[in-house]
Amino acid sequence: MPIKHENAPSIGKTASCDGYSLPASRRNLRDRLPKTGFNTLKSLGIALWFMFLTFPIMVIKVSPLEKTIEWRWSRLVYVGAGAFSLSMLWRFLIYRMEAGTSFKKPLQERLSLFFQRKKSRKATALAAAFIFAALFPFIFSTYQTSIMISALMYVMLGLGLNIVVGLAGLLDLGYVAFYAAGAYCYALLNHHFGVGFWTALPLAGAIAAVMGIFLGFPVLRLRGDYLAIVTLGFGEIIRLVLENWNEFSFGPSGIAGIDRPWDFGLGFTLRGHTIYLFYIVCLLVLLTMVVVSRLRNSRIGRAWIALREDEIACEAMGIDKTRTKLTAFALGATWAGFGGCLLAAKTTFINPASFTFMESAIILSIVVLGGMGSISGVILGAFILILMPEYLRAFSEYRMLAFGAAMVIIMVFRPQGLISATRKRYEFPEEKREGEKP
Amino acid sequence: MEYFLELFFGGLTRGSIYALLALGYTMVYGIIQLINFAHGEIYMIGAFTALIAASALSMLGLDGWSLLAIAGLAAVIYSAAYGFTLEKIAYKPLRKAPRLSPLISAIGMSIFLQNYVLLAQTSDFLSFPALIDEFPFMEDVTIIRSSELVIISVTALSTALLTIFIKFTGIGKAMRAVAQDRIMAMLLGVKVDRVISVTFIIGSALAAVGGVLISSHVGQINFYIGFIAGIKAFTAAVLGGIGSLPGAVLGGLVLGWTESFATGYVSSDYEDVFAFGLLVFILICKPSGILGRSSAEKV
């Protein structure tokens, strides 16, 4: 091999994916673990524990006013049976994960290899996605399109928050404040001055960015979780002010009758408007993706990542900490502002109830669940988290239960997120590696 | 003056409940650096268990202090059990995961538990029986109610007991050791998993105590009470300096008073704005909270 080998081993190790033998430490672990993940007695114990645990809340239903008690014993049987089988499955899966019994390469790695082998494959996939997106509103109903619009909006929000949380490593729990700022910016401008969507869109982004800088400046001294709670506090303050300052924001009743984006005087129907908005969102998502991926590999993007990894080392390397963090805050907020403006245009009605802490939590979940710092991860995360509750409507009341459970399960079995971010790294040319083989 | 004292004791009561919840947050944070977002839900489950137990028992003819004691005990036991199970399911598999993953799993658990109670019970507000009787000697006193007196004294007692527990028992020492340096504690033979479980159990039990007392004081509960209380209590924990037990209590009380006085003298609409405004202000002046030690970052 002609390349200098002194500092190559680490690169070579990650780049060569052919020799996928089980590392020694894992082999030992497998020997130490029981031969199967099943253990009936333990599962029985767990089932009994859960029957005890759920007894008061599942079985007894009281109505304090009428002074009656309803006993629902049959539920206890369901809980027991469910807990028994789930604990079997759970421990089997945990066992498999820890022992690494799957000899196959991880799906993500196989996929990325699949696309790397031939450039044309990537182009084909992109073209297919593009055509699918272009035809989507014509294939599916207005309702489906409208759901897709919200999913895409969350893709945008997720990518924006990804700058702050994923790249710069600043945990922001009050992201929704900027979202609200964007929405109210368009709604108020439209209400008072009749400003159109296209004028309001950049304004919303700018106002959110300015707000990001204003909020960011005092809090950037704080580290980690202190930052988290202060941003949470800011988010709540903004919502409460919007709720109570009636003269400014029309209070809890919100603002209705916001104009949809201008239709060039063509007189669109509701379906027409939805399709139009769908394309606008698609375009904005595309723009976001391009900007975020370009940013990530730029000087500022690398500064963010470096700052996330080690602040002191970063300062020693001459990176202006405050400015770098502030740009992350401001840029992240800009996308939230765009998102808010879109929300106002989509629903034509906004009120403070749309901007609760839960919204921030959902956007954060999109980022972490999808895989922090990875663009495709965030997109996948947004589709799962936003589309799942929509398509689970068949189970109506159980959907939020399933949603919460799914969040826990995905995190337990894939803690690094669905698609983890990969950094740019040096790869050996394909032919050379094959030539190495005996 | 009387109005001031009324507000003062109202704030103290509220602050006591925040303090009880904040202790759970701060202990868990101190040991595994996790914001346990589902802590508020544990408090809510405690309140629901107490309501169910109290309703069932009062139909058997129990009343007065014995009813409060048994319902409270049931709430404490069940909350502790839920806290224990929560940790085993949602956090233990994530010990070595990236830092934000347990946080998302906690948010997921919080959504799950809320909806579990919503589906198994009801989404309406349930009226909670007043378990705390009026004291006969309190008849002439107007500035403070009997239930407030009970809440304040129970909180003081629990805090004192917790302090003794942490300071003098073996497991308390182990908890402090794990909080300081988990790996070193492990090397010295501390069973870290057990210590974490005990932390969750104690934190959840304290949350249940708070849940029962405040529900009895306010008189109604629903599945959503835990969420807001949880956020407030976390605010209190950070306000006092997260990871510090006296800090949690102090933070809770300061938060309670701020809210109470803001409601009484300014406007009840902006109660939460004052609470969060105070938090932001204090953290900007003193980034590690009132009693938190500011640790220099190691290179």
Image (cartoon, coloured by chain):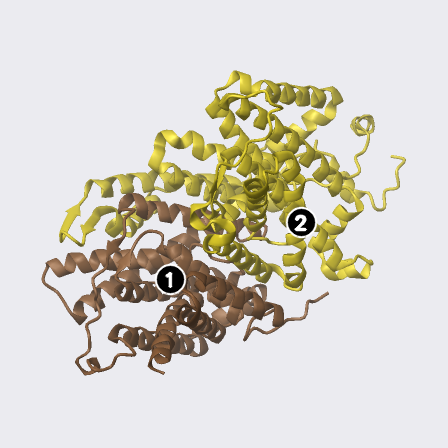
Chain colours: A yellow, B brown
> Relative to residue B172, is residue A72 depicted above or below?
above
Quadrant the N terminus of chain B occupies: bottom left
Residue at x-position 75% and y-position 56%: A323
Which quarter of the picture shows residue A217? bottom right
Residue labelled with disc 2: A209
> Looking at the image, which is closer to me, A210 or A359?
A210
Residue A415 or B126: which is nearer the viewer?
A: B126
Q: CA distance from mark 1 to mark 2?
A: 40 Å
Q: Amino acid at mark 2?
A: Ala
Residue at horizontal 55 percent and vertical 39 percent from the top: A100
Residue B78 in view: no
Residue A419 in the figure: left or right of residue A352: right
Above or below for B269 versus B159? above
Of residues A276 and B148, which is closer to you in this image? Answer: A276
State which chain disc 1 sits on.
B
Q: Position of residue A159 (x, y in %)?
A: 63, 40
Q: In the depicted view, which residue is nearer to us: B26 or B267?
A: B267
> Whole-percent x and y of residue A317?
82, 58
Q: Is residue B290 above or below residue A179?
A: below
Looking at the rendered structure, the kind of residue marked 1 is: Ser
Q: Is residue A47 visible?
A: yes
Q: Residue at x 37, y 69 (%)?
A: B14
Image location (x, y in percent) of residue B105:
48, 48
What's the mark number on residue B204?
1
Q: Are marks 1 and 2 on the same chain?
A: no
Circle 2 SS class? helix
Furthest toward the left, the residue is B61
Badge 1 element: helix
Q: Residue at x 66, y 43 (%)?
A: A203
Decide if residue A12 is on the left or right side of residue A279: right
Chain name for mark 2: A
